[in-house]
Amino acid sequence: MQNPVIVALDVPSPERALALAAELAPVVGAFKIGGELFTSAGPDIVRRLRDTGAAVFLDLKFHDIPNTVAQSVTAAVRLDIQMLTIHTSGGRAMMAAAETAATQAAAAAGRPAPLVLGVTVLTSMDEPALREIGVPATPAAQVERLGALAVQAGLRGLVCSPLEITALRRLLPAHVQLVTPGIRTGAEKADDQKRTLSPREALAAGANWLVIGRPIYAAPQPRAAAEQILASLA
Ligand code: C5P
């Protein structure tokens, strides 16, 4: 089995990110770079992480017209990342353009195409918040609608919350990769994640990858925390 643990490097400085990566690389599958780290450290942090041999998930959630998203994806692929995110609410044409750009840019660089992951409904949105932006659906129904559209548009993966895994697994073809944040082991302090599963539960429900931030990087001993998570999966 591939190591399914992706550590979210939600730290502001490149030094801290690289120190964490050096400590954790032998025991995790990949590292996620999000908006905070990328905006403060720039593309150089991606190159420096890749130089260590680690796989990189660039989580910038692109959402724009198809041409602009395609060019952003092409630029990301040139950084040699292995996964990236786009918003599915950008629509079918935008998602198809992103997937095509990923495939073509990777082929031009002589590398395998990265996994373009669709983000459906942000977990911060509830039904009233959706209604406010003109979407008369429950979050669960909207997640399924956007997930199905993403697969029709050619995406090969989605980001979803732990509580969405089972419904999406039932709905979508088996090859679609599900990447799931909101993972908690029970050992950490309560924080802003409300609906969580343990690493083992999320994989059993059908997730392929687990995005784990604070339970690893904010633990007193990050490497020991990651090793405990891996052991819980065996
Ligand atoms: O620290 P924690 O394990 O909660 O980190 C989870 C990571 O997954 C963070 O980088 C967060 O931005 C991301 N994420 C999330 N919930 C979503 C989508 C992404 O927690 N619905």
Image (cartoon, rainbow, N blue to C red):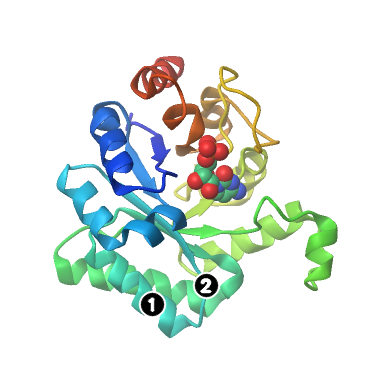
Rendered-image quadrant of the C terminus = top left
Q: Are marks 2 and 1 in contact (CB under 8 Å)?
A: no
Q: Secondary structure at mark 1?
A: helix
Q: Choose between 81 and 155: the one closer to the eye.
A: 81
Instruction: Tell me if residue 115 can be seen.
Output: no
Residue at left offset 24%, top offset 28%: 26
Residue 135: assigned label: none
Q: Secondary structure at mark 2?
A: loop
Q: Which residue is mark 2?
A: 63
Residue at left offset 73%, top offset 56%: 125
Residue type for callout 1: Ala
Instruction: Tell me if residue 149 can be seen.
Output: yes
The quarter of the image that holds ligand 1 is top right
Residue type for callout 2: His
Q: Which residue is mark 1?
A: 70
Relative image position of residue 225 (x, y in whole percent): 42, 20
Image quarter for residue 145?
bottom right
Spatial separation of the CA atoms under disc 2 and disc 1: 10 Å
Relative image position of residue 199 (x, y in whole percent): 52, 26
Relative image position of residue 89 (x, y in whole percent): 61, 70
Q: Is residue 199 above or below residue 87?
A: above
